[in-house]
Amino acid sequence: NSGFVSKYLEDMDKLDTVQLGLMLQLDGNNMTVFLEAMLLNLANKVSLDQNMKFLLQSIDLPLCFSQNQELYDQLFETLNSIKELTMEDFRFISKLYMETTKSTRSKSDKAVELTETAVLNSSIPHNI
């Protein structure tokens, strides 16, 4: 599916949100495909269009971060460098970034807690 979705997303400007939603359903677990397509699409943009807003709202940004942090960082750097970014779009991008940061931090904290609990449980003598 990734090859098909990747090829289909090359003409993202010609797609509507229904078609983009179908692509997410087809290959929504492979965030690298979507990150690459979004970066290509943003390369010549001077403003944030509806398709990009739709994808940013619809994709799993914490999953994007965990699958490919480098592309995730590039995406937000590119978004923040758009020349004609409105204040509303800037707030939208900042909100998404903050929500993703909180979510990934929360997941990381939970993983640390689980690891600490496992270590503590394994170090408790079982013959008491």
Image: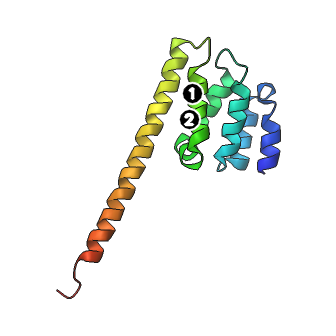
Depicted 12 relative to depicted 62: above or below: above
Residue 74 in the image: state x and y as whole percent: 60, 33
Residue 128 in the image: state x and y as whole percent: 16, 86
Q: Hey, what amino acid is under mark 2?
A: Asp
Q: Residue 42, located in which quarter of the rendered image?
A: top right
Q: Examine the rendering and report whether any part of residue 57 can be seen.
A: no
Q: Hey, what amino acid is under mark 1?
A: Glu
Q: Outermost residue toward the bottom?
A: 127
Tell me if label 1 and label 2 are in contact, CB under 8 Å: yes
* Cα–Cα span, label 1 and label 2: 6 Å
10 Å neighbourhood of mark 2: few (<14), some, or many (≥20)?
A: some
Horizontal placement of 47 versus 1: left or right? Answer: left
Q: Residue 65, located in which quarter of the rendered image?
A: top right
Horizontal placement of 65 versus 106: left or right? Answer: right
Residue 91 in the image: state x and y as whole percent: 48, 20
Is the image coloured rainbow, by chain, by secondary structure, or in one colour?
rainbow
Depicted 23 relative to depicted 125: above or below: above
Horizontal placement of 99 versus 76: left or right? Answer: left
Q: Which residue is mark 1?
A: 77
Q: Secondary structure at mark 2?
A: helix
Q: What residue is rendered at 64% in x and 19% in y?
A: 48
Q: Which residue is mark 2?
A: 73
